């Protein structure tokens, strides 16, 4: 009887121990060791914390059992996140990047910036210090806008080959009457080396999820399809003192 | 406020009639010194930056004030603890042992259960309102927050299960996969905090990674709110301080900031509150604190330390609240148990291929190195620390001025035991954050003081409501309390209501000379 009484009193301990043992039993050695350590420390902590509170202790034991079943059963849980930074190498004059941005005229940040007299800028991320002739040409709607140069470099670049934004002023007149802008990036004529444009994941496009595209000389593909990505070409409203009202892509 | 608020002091003697709110208190002397001392220091130490603007000067003076006040209060509590060798443990006279507590009526139980559900629902609402790209930690890194303008439009982000999430979570994913049994261990920068990832992994299989981490945070948020409610009832008996404090947690800047970020902070905040509850429930810091109780607390602190730096504020709190002379064996046992768990995890983790050196693991050491450099530089560098390391920004970024003002008022009218407890929690929460400032000024470290700040602020709100109720009836008192709480919640929800990222930015980076 005393044995039964002891089991009745300590059953949450036994349940937690069994749950942790079950987690370990179905795992490879390193995982079992890691689970066993954490399950042991946290399981004992949970039992100690609920001493004198039988209902709380039973609830905690049940939660540990449910969590253990979740941990130990099934396979596959989440996909690796798409890369936050990658680059596209333009090694051929025929290669071109194209990105479309819908003008966010209804966005409160856009309206606040426009009301405050902020100016639009295009931000294009590329690797290294670019200057004519080894640089990139940026166009808007097919018309040339600028060749990237050192005066447009923006943000920290700890190494000469670090990636970073180039900031290009965009006259308001170029946005008049448009719903969206179409940005093109190509190698400058006469460039003698491959140049890299940054890419990242695509999360909140203003236009389409596949609004970034690459022409590789033969056909168009979107980095959305290949890696849930986009080229880092962004539109920002910035005041004269550098205050950023918003950034869109 | 209840009629019977006669208290006993920390040293055990009943609080005398002359212990009125207007009696001089040691804490006021410390505050006066902390206000006065920066003046000659700033006059005597000529550094041009100090006088760049009135804002900069005020920031510097306030930073030095806070550092001197926190240090002075800590020293006072330690000395008080050294004196309290053989005296009885402080207790409120209106705090009967648990077994003697009057059984609540059915109506009381229903009301309490409804209040509990409402608090949990409020936490959940705030959690949902600040998910995805609305998470303030993430939002404050976007270019329009005007701090890291060189980052891309999404800020310092990753795309986890299709949700934008704070990007430091990237470093937890390998460890999560290890606990899920999907990949062998791969050394990462956050392996010391594996307890958090282990807990989150239990949610990840059914919910996915984004919502798994977020669910662990939500459970901790619930636990923190209910813990604060319990502590408020215990230390401010007969007042609604606990319930108001729980609402302040549910709408608190720190939980809103970390609530859906795949990071350990929210879980750590919850663990800290739970440890405070258990220390109080077990009366560890009072006369009933037996060695076995301390070892149990040490084990729980060790479990918290596997989540994040919970052990630093909690062991410091225990030292300040228990009194080193009376409880030195217990404190040593608790610290040893905590340390044993930490070192055991390091040994086990290294054996299976995890990493406990470099990167984030070295930041505390770098802060100590910087302190050594500052001290070697003499008084000028020590004073300059008050400007360059933004101690004011750490505190004001964690708790903006209305909360601090209310907390000061709450401290003034609180019972002695509650004041001592809150003082110990405040020092324990803020001192490690100030110590870390030479490396990074991080309000999210200073936020460990939230149990004290929110409960003191709640005590002030409860007192104002009680005063109004006495004059205009209970309905008016409740209305005033509700207005004050809603006003505070409006401030912490400005990001959702107006798009303003000001408080998210302040909590993330600590304001410099801005006020």
Image (cartoon, coloured by chain):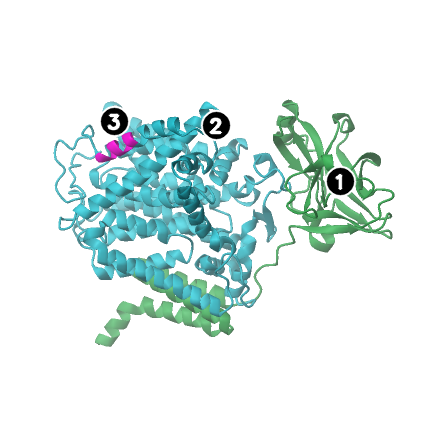
Chain colours: A green, B cyan
Q: Are marks 2 and 3 in contact (CB under 8 Å)?
A: no
Is residue B29 on the magenta stretch? yes
Residue identified by numbered label 1: A100
Q: Secondary structure at mark 2?
A: helix
Distance between mark 1 and mark 2 Cα atoms: 49 Å
Depth check: B318 or A115 in front? B318
In this rendering, the label closer to the viewer, 1 or 2: 2
> Is any part of residue B380 visible from this angle?
yes
Q: In the picture shown, does residue B242 fall above or below B484?
A: below
At x 38%, y 52%, the residue is B310
Q: Secondary structure at mark 1?
A: strand
At x 54%, y 51%, the residue is B168
Residue identified by numbered label 2: B48
Q: Chain of mark 3?
A: B
Q: Is residue B102 left or right of residue A113?
A: left
Q: Position of residue B121 (x, y in %)?
A: 42, 44
In this rendering, the label closer to the viewer, 2 or 3: 2
Residue identified by numbered label 3: B467
In the rendered structure, which segment of residues is drawn in magenta?
A: B26-33
């Amino acid at each position: 009887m005393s044995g039964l009484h002891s089991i009745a009193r300590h059953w949450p301990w036994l349940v937690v121990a069994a749950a942790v043992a079950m987690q370990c039993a179905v795992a490879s050695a390193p995982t079992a060791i890691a689970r066993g350590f954490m399950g042991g420390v946290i399981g004992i902590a949970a039992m100690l914390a609920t001493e004198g509170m039988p209902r709380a202790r039973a609830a905690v034991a049940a939660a540990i059992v449910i969590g253990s079943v979740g941990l130990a059963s099934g396979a596959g849980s989440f996909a690796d996140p798409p890369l936050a930074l990658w680059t596209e190498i333009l090694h051929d004059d025929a290669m071109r990047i194209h990105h479309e941005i819908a003008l966010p005229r209804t966005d409160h940040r856009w309206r606040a910036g426009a009301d405050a007299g902020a100016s639009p800028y295009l931000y294009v991320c590329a690797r290294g210090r670019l200057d004519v002739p080894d640089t990139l040409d940026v166009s808007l709607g097919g018309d040339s806008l600028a060749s990237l140069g050192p005066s447009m470099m923006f943000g920290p670049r700890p190494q000469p080959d670090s990636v970073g934004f180039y900031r290009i002023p965009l006259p308001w007149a170029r946005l008049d009457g448009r719903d969206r802008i179409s940005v093109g990036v190509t190698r400058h004529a006469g460039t003698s080396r491959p140049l890299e444009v940054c890419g990242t994941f695509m999360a909140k496009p203003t236009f389409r999820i596949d609004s970034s595209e690459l022409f590789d000389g033969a056909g168009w593909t979107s980095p959305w399809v290949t890696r849930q990505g986009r080229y880092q070409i962004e539109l920002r409203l910035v005041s004269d003192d550098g205050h950023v009202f918003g950034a869109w892509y | 406020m209840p009629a019977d608020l006669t208290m006993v002091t920390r040293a055990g003697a009943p609080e005398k009639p002359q212990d009125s709110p207007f009696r001089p208190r040691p804490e006021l002397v410390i505050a006066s010194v902390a206000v006065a001392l920066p003046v000659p220091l700033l006059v005597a130490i000529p550094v041009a930056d100090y006088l760049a603007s009135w804002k900069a000067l005020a920031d510097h003076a306030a930073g030095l004030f806070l550092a001197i006040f926190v240090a002075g209060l800590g020293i006072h509590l330690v000395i008080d603890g050294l004196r309290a060798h053989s005296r009885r443990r402080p207790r409120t006279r209106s705090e009967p042992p648990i077994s003697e507590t009057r059984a609540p009526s059915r109506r009381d139980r229903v009301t309490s259960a409804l209040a509990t559900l409402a608090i949990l629902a409020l936490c959940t609402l705030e959690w949902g309102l600040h998910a995805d790209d609305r998470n303030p930690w993430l939002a404050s890194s976007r270019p329009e927050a005007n701090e890291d303008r060189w980052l891309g439009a999404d800020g310092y982000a990753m795309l986890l299960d299709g949700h934008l999430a704070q990007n430091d979570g990237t470093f937890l994913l390998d460890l999560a996969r290890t606990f899920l049994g999907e990949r062998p261990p791969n050394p990462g920068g956050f392996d010391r905090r594996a307890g958090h990832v282990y807990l989150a992994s239990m949610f990840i299989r059914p919910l996915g990674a984004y919502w798994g981490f977020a669910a662990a945070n939500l459970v901790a948020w619930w636990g923190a709110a209910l813990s604060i409610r319990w502590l408020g009832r215990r230390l401010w008996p007969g007042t609604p301080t606990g319930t108001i404090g729980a609402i302040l947690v549910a709408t608190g800047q720190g939980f809103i900031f970390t609530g859906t970020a795949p990071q350990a902070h929210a879980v750590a905040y919850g663990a800290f509150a739970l440890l405070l509850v258990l220390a109080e429930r077990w009366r560890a810091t009072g006369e009933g604190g037996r060695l076995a109780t301390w070892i149990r607390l040490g084990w729980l602190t060790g479990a918290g330390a596997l989540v994040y730096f919970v052990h630093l504020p909690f062991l410091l709190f225990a030292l300040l609240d228990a009194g080193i002379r009376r409880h030195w064996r217990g404190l040593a046992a608790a610290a040893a148990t905590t340390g044993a768990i930490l070192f055991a995890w390091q040994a086990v983790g290294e054996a299976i291929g995890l990493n406990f050196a470099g990167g984030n693991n070295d930041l505390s050491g770098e802060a100590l190195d910087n302190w050594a450099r500052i001290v070697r530089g003499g008084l000028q560098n020590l004073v300059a620390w008050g400007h360059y390391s933004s101690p004011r920004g750490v505190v004001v970024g964690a708790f903006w001025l209305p909360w601090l003002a209310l907390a000061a008022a709450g401290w003034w009218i609180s019972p002695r035991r509650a004041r001592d407890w809150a003082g110990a929690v405040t020092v324990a929460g803020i001192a490690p954050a100030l110590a870390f400032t030479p490396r990074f000024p991080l309000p999210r470290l200073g936020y460990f003081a939230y149990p004290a700040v929110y409960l003191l602020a709640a005590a002030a709100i409860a007192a104002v409501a009680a005063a109004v109720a006495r004059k205009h009836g209970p309905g008016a008192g409740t209305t005033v309390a509700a207005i004050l709480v809603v006003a505070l919640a409006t401030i912490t929800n400005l990001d959702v209501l107006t798009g303003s990222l000001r408080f998210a930015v302040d909590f993330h980076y600590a304001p410099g000379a801005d006020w």
